[in-house]
Amino acid sequence: LPSIAELAENSSDRRTTVSACELLHAVVLHYIATNAANADQGESSSAIYSQLFPVLLRLSVDGETVARNLFEPLMRQLITWFTDPGRDKQGGINEMLDTVANGVCHQTNSTLREASAEKFALLLKWSLKQYGGRRQRDDLGSPTALTIDGLFKKIFHMATHPDPYKRIGSSLAFRQLANEMTNSGSCTATVLEEYLFQFLDNFLTGLRLSEKDPEALEAASLAAKSIRYCV
């Protein structure tokens, strides 16, 4: 699998790249389908997903058209798949969240940052939809695969991080989350209201931290936009 991924991302020969992308796409689908029948393999699968998902995310914004056409829809499908509460034991959802959190903070790839921010919004959308608005625990009292608290706390952590690119990523993710929450139903709007003051507090902290950043990074202006949205 690492060799296929390496060829898909870095081969200088287009035919090799396309073939590797198609093979990688098929292998991923086969692995996930096989893993679905073996729910107890969640721990071992998580290690694989932590290596695999960043590759799939990068390929979803790759300059090669075939790669984008294969992996951008696949990323959306995987988010829908892993936010399903029936797949808690399969692993994957936390690795997906870590992947998009790292992608939205990328220092040089703005396309990857924007795509990762969109995936944050998809994680919120499908977490709410799959869990029917239950944000903490399922009906049996066991922890859900991805709580809304967990998703938002990831953004709060980035918003107050010393690294300016983390703070930039938090603002980009919040913009997409806010769009999703305001354009969705009443349940989603209620979630926004519940966490609004926490977002405001963390972005105010991030704005203070951004005073020492190079102006060209625009971390301060992005934090200010997030604050204006909150108020």
Image (tube, rainbow, N blue to C red):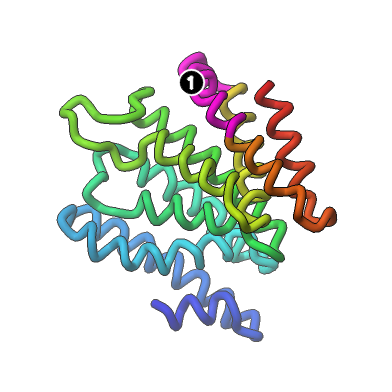
Residue in the foreground of this view, choosing between 108 and 213: 213
In the image, what residue occupies the spot 72% across and 58% down?
A: 110
Quarter of the image with the C terminus is top right
Q: Does the magenta stretch include residue 169?
A: no
- Could you say whether the residue bearing mark 1 is in a helix, strand or loop? helix
Left or right relative to 11: residue 74: left
* Residue extent of the magenta highlight: 184-201
Q: Where is residue 91 in the image (x, y as percent from the top left)?
A: 29, 54
Q: Quadrant of residue 50?
A: bottom left
Q: How far from the left and from the top, in percent, is residue 190?
A: 49, 17
In the displayed structure, 214 sits above or below 211; it is below
Q: In the displayed structure, does residue 107 sit left or right of residue 177? A: right
Looking at the picture, how far across and down is residue 69, in whole percent?
A: 60, 58
Q: Is 194 contained in the magenta span?
A: yes
- The front one of 207 and 221 is 207
- Residue sticking out furthest to the bottom: 12
Q: Which residue is drawn at 68% across and 63% down?
A: 107
